[in-house]
Amino acid sequence: MDSLLPEVQEIFRAVFDQPGLIITRESNASTVDDWDSLTHINLVTAIEKSFKIKFALGELQELKNVGDLLDLAQTKMAAK
Amino acid sequence: MNRYRSIWTSIGEAVGCQIVQNNFELPCNAILGNLDAISPGGATRFINELNRCFALEATANPRLTLQDLSSISARVGLNQWFDPERWLSYKIANTVEGSFAIATSLAALVRAMYGRARKVLVLDLDNTLWGGVIGDDGPDKIVLGRETPIAEAYTAFQEYCLSLRQRGVLLAVCSKNDEAVAKQGFAHPDSVLKLEHFSAFKANWEPKHENILAIAQELNLGVDSFVFVDDNPAERAIVEAQIPSVAVPDVGNEVAKYASIIEVQRYFELLSLGKEDLTRAKLYEQNAQRAHLEQRFANYGEYLDSLEMTAEIGAFNATYMERIAQLTNKSNQFNLTTRRYTLAEIESTVNDGRHIGIYGKLADRFGDNGLISVVLGSVQGLELHLDLWLMSCRVPKREMEIAMLDGLVERAKERNIELVIGYYLPTAKNGMVANHYEKLGFTLTSKDEATGATTWSLDIKTYADRSRHIRILERVHGQPVA
Protein backbone atom coordinates (compact mmCIF):
# COMPACT_ATOMS: atom_id res chain seq x y z
CA MET A 1 0.00 0.00 0.00
CA ASP A 2 2.96 2.31 0.54
CA SER A 3 4.28 2.15 -3.01
CA LEU A 4 3.36 5.80 -3.45
CA LEU A 5 5.37 6.93 -0.42
CA PRO A 6 8.72 7.59 -2.19
CA GLU A 7 6.99 9.69 -4.85
CA VAL A 8 4.92 11.56 -2.29
CA GLN A 9 8.07 12.20 -0.27
CA GLU A 10 9.64 13.84 -3.34
CA ILE A 11 6.55 16.04 -3.72
CA PHE A 12 6.80 17.06 -0.06
CA ARG A 13 10.49 17.90 -0.47
CA ALA A 14 9.75 20.09 -3.49
CA VAL A 15 6.74 21.86 -1.96
CA PHE A 16 8.42 22.50 1.39
CA ASP A 17 11.76 23.19 -0.25
CA GLN A 18 13.45 20.81 2.22
CA PRO A 19 15.63 18.38 0.22
CA GLY A 20 16.33 16.14 3.22
CA LEU A 21 12.74 15.88 4.48
CA ILE A 22 11.67 12.37 5.55
CA ILE A 23 7.96 11.56 5.35
CA THR A 24 6.32 8.53 7.00
CA ARG A 25 2.74 7.28 7.13
CA GLU A 26 2.45 8.95 10.52
CA SER A 27 3.57 12.41 9.36
CA ASN A 28 0.99 15.18 9.69
CA ALA A 29 0.74 18.96 9.82
CA SER A 30 2.03 19.11 13.37
CA THR A 31 5.15 16.99 12.72
CA VAL A 32 6.28 18.69 9.51
CA ASP A 33 7.71 22.22 9.74
CA ASP A 34 5.98 24.91 7.66
CA TRP A 35 2.92 22.79 6.88
CA ASP A 36 0.43 25.65 6.87
CA SER A 37 -2.72 26.32 4.91
CA LEU A 38 -0.91 27.63 1.85
CA THR A 39 1.64 24.82 1.59
CA HIS A 40 -1.27 22.46 2.15
CA ILE A 41 -2.96 23.78 -1.00
CA ASN A 42 0.28 23.46 -2.95
CA LEU A 43 0.72 19.93 -1.65
CA VAL A 44 -2.78 18.80 -2.59
CA THR A 45 -2.50 20.43 -6.03
CA ALA A 46 0.88 18.81 -6.66
CA ILE A 47 -0.38 15.36 -5.61
CA GLU A 48 -3.50 15.72 -7.77
CA LYS A 49 -1.36 16.70 -10.73
CA SER A 50 1.30 14.02 -10.44
CA PHE A 51 -1.14 11.11 -9.82
CA LYS A 52 -3.75 12.56 -12.20
CA ILE A 53 -6.51 12.32 -9.61
CA LYS A 54 -8.91 14.86 -8.12
CA PHE A 55 -9.97 14.85 -4.49
CA ALA A 56 -13.66 15.52 -3.98
CA LEU A 57 -14.94 18.24 -1.74
CA GLY A 58 -14.74 17.16 1.90
CA GLU A 59 -12.61 14.08 1.32
CA LEU A 60 -9.50 15.74 2.68
CA GLN A 61 -11.10 16.81 5.96
CA GLU A 62 -11.31 13.17 7.05
CA LEU A 63 -7.58 12.53 6.68
CA LYS A 64 -5.43 12.39 9.82
CA ASN A 65 -1.97 11.80 8.42
CA VAL A 66 0.06 11.01 5.31
CA GLY A 67 -0.91 7.34 5.57
CA ASP A 68 -4.60 8.22 5.13
CA LEU A 69 -3.67 10.47 2.20
CA LEU A 70 -1.73 7.64 0.53
CA ASP A 71 -4.61 5.20 0.97
CA LEU A 72 -7.11 7.68 -0.48
CA ALA A 73 -4.85 8.41 -3.46
CA GLN A 74 -4.34 4.70 -4.01
CA THR A 75 -8.09 4.03 -3.97
CA LYS A 76 -8.70 6.84 -6.44
CA MET A 77 -6.02 5.62 -8.81
CA ALA A 78 -7.35 2.07 -8.67
CA ALA A 79 -10.87 3.31 -9.43
CA LYS A 80 -9.80 5.00 -12.66
CA MET B 1 -16.39 53.84 -7.79
CA ASN B 2 -15.99 56.30 -4.95
CA ARG B 3 -15.02 53.46 -2.68
CA TYR B 4 -12.25 52.35 -5.04
CA ARG B 5 -11.12 55.94 -5.56
CA SER B 6 -10.76 56.45 -1.81
CA ILE B 7 -8.81 53.19 -1.48
CA TRP B 8 -6.39 54.27 -4.23
CA THR B 9 -6.00 57.71 -2.66
CA SER B 10 -5.28 56.23 0.78
CA ILE B 11 -2.69 53.83 -0.62
CA GLY B 12 -1.13 56.72 -2.54
CA GLU B 13 -0.90 58.83 0.59
CA ALA B 14 0.24 56.06 2.91
CA VAL B 15 2.78 54.31 0.68
CA GLY B 16 3.21 56.39 -2.47
CA CYS B 17 3.69 53.34 -4.66
CA GLN B 18 2.49 52.12 -8.01
CA ILE B 19 -0.89 50.40 -7.57
CA VAL B 20 -1.88 47.30 -9.51
CA GLN B 21 -5.65 47.00 -9.56
CA ASN B 22 -7.39 43.94 -10.97
CA ASN B 23 -10.53 44.54 -12.94
CA PHE B 24 -13.16 41.80 -12.74
CA GLU B 25 -13.83 38.65 -14.67
CA LEU B 26 -17.39 38.10 -15.82
CA PRO B 27 -19.57 36.16 -13.36
CA CYS B 28 -19.38 32.36 -13.51
CA ASN B 29 -23.14 32.09 -13.84
CA ALA B 30 -25.18 34.43 -15.99
CA ILE B 31 -28.37 34.22 -13.96
CA LEU B 32 -30.37 36.11 -16.56
CA GLY B 33 -28.86 34.29 -19.53
CA ASN B 34 -28.17 36.60 -22.45
CA LEU B 35 -30.21 39.26 -20.71
CA ASP B 36 -27.55 39.34 -17.98
CA ALA B 37 -25.44 41.59 -20.21
CA ILE B 38 -28.36 43.91 -20.99
CA SER B 39 -30.71 44.23 -18.03
CA PRO B 40 -29.89 46.92 -15.43
CA GLY B 41 -29.99 44.17 -12.80
CA GLY B 42 -27.63 41.86 -14.69
CA ALA B 43 -24.34 41.01 -13.01
CA THR B 44 -22.62 40.75 -16.40
CA ARG B 45 -23.73 44.24 -17.32
CA PHE B 46 -22.62 45.54 -13.92
CA ILE B 47 -19.12 44.04 -14.27
CA ASN B 48 -18.76 45.42 -17.79
CA GLU B 49 -19.71 48.91 -16.59
CA LEU B 50 -17.39 48.72 -13.59
CA ASN B 51 -14.48 47.58 -15.76
CA ARG B 52 -15.10 50.47 -18.14
CA CYS B 53 -14.95 52.92 -15.21
CA PHE B 54 -11.70 51.31 -13.98
CA ALA B 55 -10.20 51.78 -17.43
CA LEU B 56 -11.10 55.48 -17.44
CA GLU B 57 -9.58 55.91 -13.97
CA ALA B 58 -6.38 54.14 -14.98
CA THR B 59 -6.07 56.36 -18.06
CA ALA B 60 -6.33 59.47 -15.92
CA ASN B 61 -4.16 58.28 -13.02
CA PRO B 62 -0.59 57.32 -13.97
CA ARG B 63 -0.02 55.67 -10.58
CA LEU B 64 -2.87 53.24 -11.19
CA THR B 65 -2.00 50.20 -13.29
CA LEU B 66 -4.85 47.98 -14.35
CA GLN B 67 -4.43 44.23 -14.58
CA ASP B 68 -6.98 43.13 -17.15
CA LEU B 69 -8.36 40.05 -15.39
CA SER B 70 -11.42 40.26 -17.59
CA SER B 71 -9.34 39.47 -20.70
CA ILE B 72 -6.99 37.08 -18.90
CA SER B 73 -9.94 34.98 -17.69
CA ALA B 74 -11.56 35.11 -21.12
CA ARG B 75 -8.39 33.77 -22.74
CA VAL B 76 -8.29 30.86 -20.31
CA GLY B 77 -12.06 30.40 -20.68
CA LEU B 78 -14.45 31.06 -17.83
CA ASN B 79 -15.31 27.37 -17.50
CA GLN B 80 -11.61 26.61 -17.02
CA TRP B 81 -11.19 29.67 -14.82
CA PHE B 82 -13.57 29.20 -11.92
CA ASP B 83 -12.92 26.31 -9.56
CA PRO B 84 -15.79 25.88 -7.07
CA GLU B 85 -13.93 23.22 -5.11
CA ARG B 86 -10.89 25.41 -4.56
CA TRP B 87 -13.22 28.25 -3.67
CA LEU B 88 -15.16 26.22 -1.14
CA SER B 89 -12.07 24.58 0.36
CA TYR B 90 -9.52 27.40 0.29
CA LYS B 91 -11.33 30.55 -0.91
CA ILE B 92 -9.23 30.56 -4.03
CA ALA B 93 -11.63 31.46 -6.81
CA ASN B 94 -9.79 30.15 -9.82
CA THR B 95 -8.11 27.04 -11.12
CA VAL B 96 -4.36 26.43 -11.04
CA GLU B 97 -4.30 27.37 -14.75
CA GLY B 98 -6.03 30.64 -13.88
CA SER B 99 -3.54 31.41 -11.11
CA PHE B 100 -0.72 30.69 -13.54
CA ALA B 101 -2.15 33.13 -16.08
CA ILE B 102 -2.46 35.83 -13.41
CA ALA B 103 1.10 35.22 -12.22
CA THR B 104 2.44 35.48 -15.77
CA SER B 105 0.64 38.76 -16.28
CA LEU B 106 1.64 40.21 -12.92
CA ALA B 107 5.28 39.26 -13.42
CA ALA B 108 5.20 41.01 -16.80
CA LEU B 109 3.71 44.15 -15.23
CA VAL B 110 6.37 44.24 -12.53
CA ARG B 111 9.10 43.72 -15.12
CA ALA B 112 7.65 46.62 -17.12
CA MET B 113 7.64 48.85 -14.01
CA TYR B 114 11.31 48.15 -13.49
CA GLY B 115 12.11 48.67 -17.14
CA ARG B 116 12.84 45.01 -17.74
CA ALA B 117 10.24 44.33 -20.41
CA ARG B 118 11.81 43.02 -23.60
CA LYS B 119 12.46 45.45 -26.42
CA VAL B 120 13.72 43.55 -29.45
CA LEU B 121 12.21 40.77 -31.56
CA VAL B 122 14.92 38.88 -33.46
CA LEU B 123 13.54 36.90 -36.37
CA ASP B 124 14.75 34.08 -38.55
CA LEU B 125 13.69 34.27 -42.22
CA ASP B 126 13.14 30.93 -44.01
CA ASN B 127 10.02 29.21 -42.65
CA THR B 128 9.66 31.92 -40.04
CA LEU B 129 8.83 35.11 -41.94
CA TRP B 130 8.05 33.31 -45.18
CA GLY B 131 7.59 29.71 -46.30
CA GLY B 132 10.37 27.96 -48.14
CA VAL B 133 14.11 28.54 -48.39
CA ILE B 134 14.91 31.67 -50.35
CA GLY B 135 18.42 30.53 -51.23
CA ASP B 136 17.13 27.28 -52.78
CA ASP B 137 13.70 28.23 -54.04
CA GLY B 138 14.50 31.76 -55.22
CA PRO B 139 12.87 35.04 -54.16
CA ASP B 140 9.86 34.52 -56.45
CA LYS B 141 9.04 31.12 -55.00
CA ILE B 142 8.87 31.91 -51.30
CA VAL B 143 5.44 31.31 -49.76
CA LEU B 144 3.87 34.65 -48.91
CA GLY B 145 0.72 36.52 -49.84
CA ARG B 146 -2.96 35.64 -50.03
CA GLU B 147 -3.00 32.72 -52.48
CA THR B 148 -2.93 29.74 -50.11
CA PRO B 149 -3.76 29.24 -46.43
CA ILE B 150 -0.07 28.81 -45.61
CA ALA B 151 0.90 31.94 -47.53
CA GLU B 152 -1.80 33.83 -45.64
CA ALA B 153 -0.44 32.53 -42.35
CA TYR B 154 3.05 33.90 -43.09
CA THR B 155 1.53 37.21 -44.15
CA ALA B 156 -0.47 37.33 -40.91
CA PHE B 157 2.68 36.69 -38.86
CA GLN B 158 4.47 39.51 -40.71
CA GLU B 159 1.53 41.79 -39.91
CA TYR B 160 1.81 40.79 -36.25
CA CYS B 161 5.54 41.66 -36.25
CA LEU B 162 4.81 44.99 -37.94
CA SER B 163 2.18 45.86 -35.35
CA LEU B 164 4.74 45.17 -32.59
CA ARG B 165 7.17 47.49 -34.32
CA GLN B 166 4.54 50.21 -34.53
CA ARG B 167 4.14 50.12 -30.75
CA GLY B 168 7.86 50.36 -30.05
CA VAL B 169 9.35 46.86 -30.29
CA LEU B 170 12.44 46.84 -32.47
CA LEU B 171 12.72 44.17 -35.16
CA ALA B 172 15.95 42.49 -36.21
CA VAL B 173 16.82 39.71 -38.64
CA CYS B 174 19.16 36.87 -37.73
CA SER B 175 19.28 34.32 -40.53
CA LYS B 176 21.65 31.82 -42.07
CA ASN B 177 21.54 33.14 -45.60
CA ASP B 178 23.46 35.11 -48.15
CA GLU B 179 22.74 38.72 -47.22
CA ALA B 180 21.91 39.91 -50.75
CA VAL B 181 19.61 36.94 -51.35
CA ALA B 182 17.91 37.34 -47.95
CA LYS B 183 17.15 40.99 -48.63
CA GLN B 184 15.39 40.09 -51.87
CA GLY B 185 12.68 38.43 -49.78
CA PHE B 186 11.52 41.84 -48.57
CA ALA B 187 11.24 43.05 -52.15
CA HIS B 188 8.58 40.37 -52.70
CA PRO B 189 5.39 42.25 -53.65
CA ASP B 190 3.43 40.51 -50.88
CA SER B 191 5.95 41.14 -48.12
CA VAL B 192 4.28 43.28 -45.45
CA LEU B 193 7.64 43.82 -43.79
CA LYS B 194 10.11 45.94 -45.70
CA LEU B 195 13.84 46.32 -45.13
CA GLU B 196 13.38 49.70 -43.45
CA HIS B 197 11.35 48.07 -40.67
CA PHE B 198 14.44 46.27 -39.34
CA SER B 199 16.73 48.04 -36.92
CA ALA B 200 19.43 45.41 -37.47
CA PHE B 201 19.93 42.85 -40.23
CA LYS B 202 22.30 39.89 -39.92
CA ALA B 203 22.16 37.37 -42.74
CA ASN B 204 25.37 35.34 -42.96
CA TRP B 205 26.75 31.94 -42.01
CA GLU B 206 28.08 32.74 -38.56
CA PRO B 207 26.50 31.02 -35.52
CA LYS B 208 23.25 32.75 -34.56
CA HIS B 209 24.24 33.47 -30.98
CA GLU B 210 27.24 35.44 -32.25
CA ASN B 211 25.01 37.41 -34.58
CA ILE B 212 22.60 38.14 -31.74
CA LEU B 213 25.46 39.49 -29.62
CA ALA B 214 26.52 41.65 -32.59
CA ILE B 215 22.95 42.98 -32.92
CA ALA B 216 22.91 43.83 -29.21
CA GLN B 217 26.09 45.80 -29.61
CA GLU B 218 24.81 47.58 -32.71
CA LEU B 219 21.56 48.62 -30.99
CA ASN B 220 23.29 49.34 -27.70
CA LEU B 221 20.79 47.17 -25.84
CA GLY B 222 21.31 44.22 -23.50
CA VAL B 223 20.57 40.73 -24.82
CA ASP B 224 18.23 40.29 -21.86
CA SER B 225 15.80 42.54 -23.75
CA PHE B 226 15.78 40.16 -26.75
CA VAL B 227 13.24 37.58 -27.91
CA PHE B 228 14.43 35.15 -30.59
CA VAL B 229 11.99 33.43 -32.93
CA ASP B 230 13.13 30.63 -35.20
CA ASP B 231 11.26 27.61 -36.57
CA ASN B 232 14.40 25.47 -36.29
CA PRO B 233 14.68 23.76 -32.87
CA ALA B 234 18.44 23.29 -33.28
CA GLU B 235 18.96 27.05 -33.70
CA ARG B 236 16.69 27.76 -30.76
CA ALA B 237 18.64 25.30 -28.61
CA ILE B 238 22.04 26.77 -29.42
CA VAL B 239 20.91 30.36 -28.77
CA GLU B 240 19.25 29.31 -25.53
CA ALA B 241 22.39 27.48 -24.39
CA GLN B 242 24.88 30.15 -25.43
CA ILE B 243 22.96 33.23 -24.25
CA PRO B 244 20.58 32.15 -21.48
CA SER B 245 19.20 35.67 -21.01
CA VAL B 246 17.67 35.75 -24.49
CA ALA B 247 14.04 34.61 -24.41
CA VAL B 248 13.61 31.73 -26.84
CA PRO B 249 9.96 30.69 -26.96
CA ASP B 250 9.28 27.20 -28.29
CA VAL B 251 7.25 28.41 -31.27
CA GLY B 252 7.22 24.97 -32.89
CA ASN B 253 7.16 25.05 -36.66
CA GLU B 254 3.58 26.00 -37.47
CA VAL B 255 3.51 29.62 -38.50
CA ALA B 256 -0.18 30.02 -37.66
CA LYS B 257 0.69 29.55 -33.98
CA TYR B 258 3.82 31.73 -33.69
CA ALA B 259 2.01 34.92 -32.67
CA SER B 260 -0.17 33.38 -29.96
CA ILE B 261 2.82 31.50 -28.48
CA ILE B 262 4.77 34.76 -28.30
CA GLU B 263 1.76 36.61 -26.85
CA VAL B 264 1.23 34.15 -23.99
CA GLN B 265 4.65 34.99 -22.56
CA ARG B 266 3.88 38.73 -22.34
CA TYR B 267 7.44 39.69 -23.23
CA PHE B 268 6.66 43.20 -24.38
CA GLU B 269 4.31 44.38 -21.61
CA LEU B 270 4.05 48.16 -21.34
CA LEU B 271 2.49 50.43 -18.74
CA SER B 272 1.49 53.30 -20.95
CA LEU B 273 1.73 54.03 -24.62
CA GLY B 274 3.74 57.22 -24.94
CA LYS B 275 4.98 59.16 -27.94
CA GLU B 276 8.33 57.55 -27.16
CA ASP B 277 7.01 54.08 -27.86
CA LEU B 278 5.36 55.04 -31.11
CA THR B 279 8.50 56.68 -32.50
CA ARG B 280 11.22 54.46 -30.99
CA ALA B 281 11.97 52.52 -34.14
CA LYS B 282 12.30 55.80 -36.04
CA LEU B 283 14.86 57.05 -33.50
CA TYR B 284 17.04 54.01 -34.08
CA GLU B 285 16.80 54.63 -37.82
CA GLN B 286 18.06 58.19 -37.32
CA ASN B 287 20.95 56.79 -35.28
CA ALA B 288 22.03 54.76 -38.27
CA GLN B 289 22.11 57.96 -40.35
CA ARG B 290 24.19 59.69 -37.69
CA ALA B 291 26.68 56.82 -37.64
CA HIS B 292 26.97 57.12 -41.39
CA LEU B 293 27.68 60.86 -41.09
CA GLU B 294 30.29 60.27 -38.39
CA GLN B 295 32.44 58.30 -40.82
CA ARG B 296 32.79 61.33 -43.07
CA PHE B 297 34.58 63.48 -40.50
CA ALA B 298 38.21 63.16 -39.58
CA ASN B 299 37.77 64.99 -36.31
CA TYR B 300 35.14 64.01 -33.76
CA GLY B 301 34.50 67.59 -32.62
CA GLU B 302 33.81 68.57 -36.21
CA TYR B 303 31.31 65.72 -36.41
CA LEU B 304 29.58 66.88 -33.23
CA ASP B 305 29.34 70.42 -34.61
CA SER B 306 27.85 69.08 -37.83
CA LEU B 307 25.01 67.51 -35.85
CA GLU B 308 23.81 71.04 -34.95
CA MET B 309 22.73 69.91 -31.51
CA THR B 310 20.52 71.95 -29.23
CA ALA B 311 19.71 71.00 -25.67
CA GLU B 312 17.00 72.04 -23.29
CA ILE B 313 18.04 71.65 -19.68
CA GLY B 314 15.46 72.36 -17.03
CA ALA B 315 14.37 71.68 -13.48
CA PHE B 316 12.00 68.72 -12.94
CA ASN B 317 8.46 69.85 -13.73
CA ALA B 318 5.02 68.32 -14.11
CA THR B 319 5.23 67.92 -17.88
CA TYR B 320 8.15 65.51 -17.72
CA MET B 321 7.63 63.77 -14.39
CA GLU B 322 6.37 60.55 -15.94
CA ARG B 323 9.17 60.33 -18.50
CA ILE B 324 11.77 61.04 -15.78
CA ALA B 325 10.43 58.23 -13.59
CA GLN B 326 10.31 55.94 -16.63
CA LEU B 327 13.98 56.70 -17.43
CA THR B 328 15.13 55.94 -13.89
CA ASN B 329 13.60 52.50 -14.30
CA LYS B 330 14.74 51.81 -17.86
CA SER B 331 18.34 52.99 -17.96
CA ASN B 332 20.87 50.35 -17.03
CA GLN B 333 24.08 51.16 -18.86
CA PHE B 334 24.64 54.91 -18.56
CA ASN B 335 23.43 54.97 -14.98
CA LEU B 336 25.83 55.81 -12.16
CA THR B 337 23.77 54.53 -9.22
CA THR B 338 20.92 52.51 -10.83
CA ARG B 339 18.48 53.82 -8.25
CA ARG B 340 14.89 53.26 -9.33
CA TYR B 341 12.24 55.86 -8.55
CA THR B 342 8.48 55.66 -8.71
CA LEU B 343 6.55 58.61 -10.08
CA ALA B 344 5.56 59.57 -6.53
CA GLU B 345 9.16 59.54 -5.32
CA ILE B 346 10.30 61.77 -8.18
CA GLU B 347 7.43 64.18 -7.50
CA SER B 348 8.35 64.41 -3.83
CA THR B 349 11.91 65.58 -4.66
CA VAL B 350 10.49 68.72 -6.28
CA ASN B 351 8.52 69.92 -3.30
CA ASP B 352 10.78 69.08 -0.37
CA GLY B 353 13.29 71.86 -1.16
CA ARG B 354 16.21 69.55 -0.42
CA HIS B 355 16.89 68.37 -3.96
CA ILE B 356 18.15 69.71 -7.25
CA GLY B 357 16.79 67.69 -10.14
CA ILE B 358 17.39 68.51 -13.78
CA TYR B 359 16.46 66.85 -17.06
CA GLY B 360 18.04 67.26 -20.48
CA LYS B 361 16.45 67.07 -23.90
CA LEU B 362 18.60 66.84 -26.98
CA ALA B 363 17.69 67.57 -30.59
CA ASP B 364 19.89 67.55 -33.67
CA ARG B 365 19.56 67.91 -37.42
CA PHE B 366 18.22 64.36 -37.75
CA GLY B 367 15.48 64.71 -35.22
CA ASP B 368 14.47 65.22 -31.63
CA ASN B 369 15.80 62.60 -29.21
CA GLY B 370 13.40 63.80 -26.53
CA LEU B 371 14.18 63.75 -22.82
CA ILE B 372 17.28 61.59 -22.51
CA SER B 373 19.16 62.58 -19.36
CA VAL B 374 18.37 63.04 -15.68
CA VAL B 375 20.55 64.21 -12.78
CA LEU B 376 19.26 64.39 -9.22
CA GLY B 377 21.19 65.56 -6.18
CA SER B 378 20.33 66.14 -2.55
CA VAL B 379 21.50 69.30 -0.83
CA GLN B 380 23.43 68.78 2.41
CA GLY B 381 24.77 72.10 3.65
CA LEU B 382 27.32 73.36 1.13
CA GLU B 383 27.44 70.00 -0.62
CA LEU B 384 25.32 68.50 -3.36
CA HIS B 385 25.26 64.67 -3.29
CA LEU B 386 24.34 63.12 -6.65
CA ASP B 387 21.83 60.34 -6.03
CA LEU B 388 21.25 59.82 -9.71
CA TRP B 389 22.96 60.54 -12.99
CA LEU B 390 21.70 58.72 -16.02
CA MET B 391 21.40 59.06 -19.75
CA SER B 392 19.64 57.09 -22.44
CA CYS B 393 22.05 55.03 -24.51
CA ARG B 394 20.40 56.46 -27.58
CA VAL B 395 22.76 59.44 -27.37
CA PRO B 396 26.21 58.26 -26.25
CA LYS B 397 29.37 60.29 -26.86
CA ARG B 398 27.56 63.51 -27.71
CA GLU B 399 29.05 65.48 -24.79
CA MET B 400 25.55 65.80 -23.38
CA GLU B 401 26.98 64.89 -19.95
CA ILE B 402 29.14 68.04 -20.12
CA ALA B 403 26.09 70.16 -20.90
CA MET B 404 24.27 68.50 -18.00
CA LEU B 405 27.18 69.28 -15.65
CA ASP B 406 27.05 72.94 -16.74
CA GLY B 407 23.31 73.02 -16.07
CA LEU B 408 23.73 71.31 -12.72
CA VAL B 409 26.53 73.59 -11.51
CA GLU B 410 24.61 76.67 -12.56
CA ARG B 411 21.68 75.66 -10.36
CA ALA B 412 23.91 74.42 -7.53
CA LYS B 413 25.65 77.81 -7.37
CA GLU B 414 22.27 79.51 -7.06
CA ARG B 415 21.84 77.44 -3.88
CA ASN B 416 25.37 78.40 -2.64
CA ILE B 417 26.71 74.90 -3.10
CA GLU B 418 30.51 74.65 -3.12
CA LEU B 419 31.18 70.97 -3.55
CA VAL B 420 29.49 68.36 -5.76
CA ILE B 421 29.83 64.73 -4.64
CA GLY B 422 29.36 61.96 -7.21
CA TYR B 423 28.86 58.24 -6.63
CA TYR B 424 29.48 55.29 -8.90
CA LEU B 425 27.88 52.00 -7.84
CA PRO B 426 28.96 49.22 -10.21
CA THR B 427 26.42 46.75 -11.61
CA ALA B 428 26.71 44.06 -14.27
CA LYS B 429 25.66 46.61 -16.87
CA ASN B 430 27.01 50.06 -16.06
CA GLY B 431 30.73 49.50 -16.68
CA MET B 432 30.63 52.15 -19.41
CA VAL B 433 30.33 54.91 -16.81
CA ALA B 434 33.00 53.68 -14.36
CA ASN B 435 35.17 56.66 -15.38
CA HIS B 436 32.32 59.13 -15.84
CA TYR B 437 33.26 61.44 -12.98
CA GLU B 438 36.95 61.20 -13.74
CA LYS B 439 36.30 62.34 -17.31
CA LEU B 440 34.32 65.28 -15.94
CA GLY B 441 37.29 66.37 -13.79
CA PHE B 442 36.09 65.07 -10.42
CA THR B 443 38.64 63.88 -7.87
CA LEU B 444 38.45 60.34 -6.47
CA THR B 445 37.86 60.55 -2.71
CA SER B 446 37.19 56.94 -1.78
CA LYS B 447 36.92 53.47 -3.20
CA ASP B 448 35.28 50.40 -1.68
CA GLU B 449 37.62 47.55 -2.63
CA ALA B 450 34.94 44.93 -2.03
CA THR B 451 32.20 46.37 -4.23
CA GLY B 452 34.23 48.63 -6.53
CA ALA B 453 31.98 51.57 -5.58
CA THR B 454 33.71 54.94 -5.89
CA THR B 455 33.05 58.44 -4.55
CA TRP B 456 34.13 61.61 -6.32
CA SER B 457 34.09 65.30 -5.60
CA LEU B 458 34.26 68.50 -7.63
CA ASP B 459 34.87 71.97 -6.22
CA ILE B 460 32.58 74.28 -8.19
CA LYS B 461 33.53 77.64 -6.67
CA THR B 462 35.52 78.54 -9.79
CA TYR B 463 33.70 76.31 -12.27
CA ALA B 464 33.19 77.78 -15.76
CA ASP B 465 30.86 76.39 -18.42
CA ARG B 466 32.52 73.72 -20.57
CA SER B 467 29.99 72.66 -23.20
CA ARG B 468 31.31 73.45 -26.70
CA HIS B 469 29.28 71.49 -29.22
CA ILE B 470 25.73 71.83 -27.95
CA ARG B 471 23.72 75.02 -28.08
CA ILE B 472 21.81 75.39 -24.79
CA LEU B 473 18.38 77.00 -24.96
CA GLU B 474 18.12 80.08 -22.73
CA ARG B 475 16.26 79.98 -19.43
CA VAL B 476 13.43 82.43 -18.78
CA HIS B 477 11.78 82.39 -15.37
CA GLY B 478 13.85 79.35 -14.51
CA GLN B 479 12.60 77.30 -17.44
CA PRO B 480 14.15 77.01 -20.90
CA VAL B 481 12.43 78.57 -23.89
CA ALA B 482 13.03 77.88 -27.55
Image (spheres, rainbow, N blue to C red):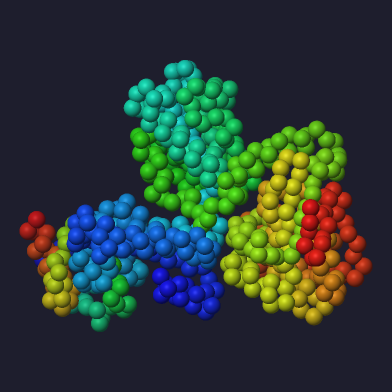
Q: Nearer the viewer, residue B191 or B115?
A: B191
Task: Name the residue rendered at 35%, 39% in the picture.
Answer: B257
Q: Left or right of B83: which side holds B269? A: right
x%, y% of residue B93?
27, 66
x%, y% of residue B471?
84, 50
Is residue B133 in sight in this rendering?
no
Identify the image quadrant of residue B305.
top right
Q: Residue furthest bottom?
A: A30
Task: Name the residue rendered at 38%, 31% in the picture.
Answer: B153
Q: Left or right of B286: which side holds A3? A: left
Identify whether A36 is placed above or below B195.
below
Is residue B84 in sight in this rendering?
yes
Identify whether B308 is placed above or below B81.
above
Q: Residue furthest front?
A: B40
x%, y% of residue B402?
81, 56
Task: Name the residue rendered at 58%, 22% in the picture.
Answer: B180
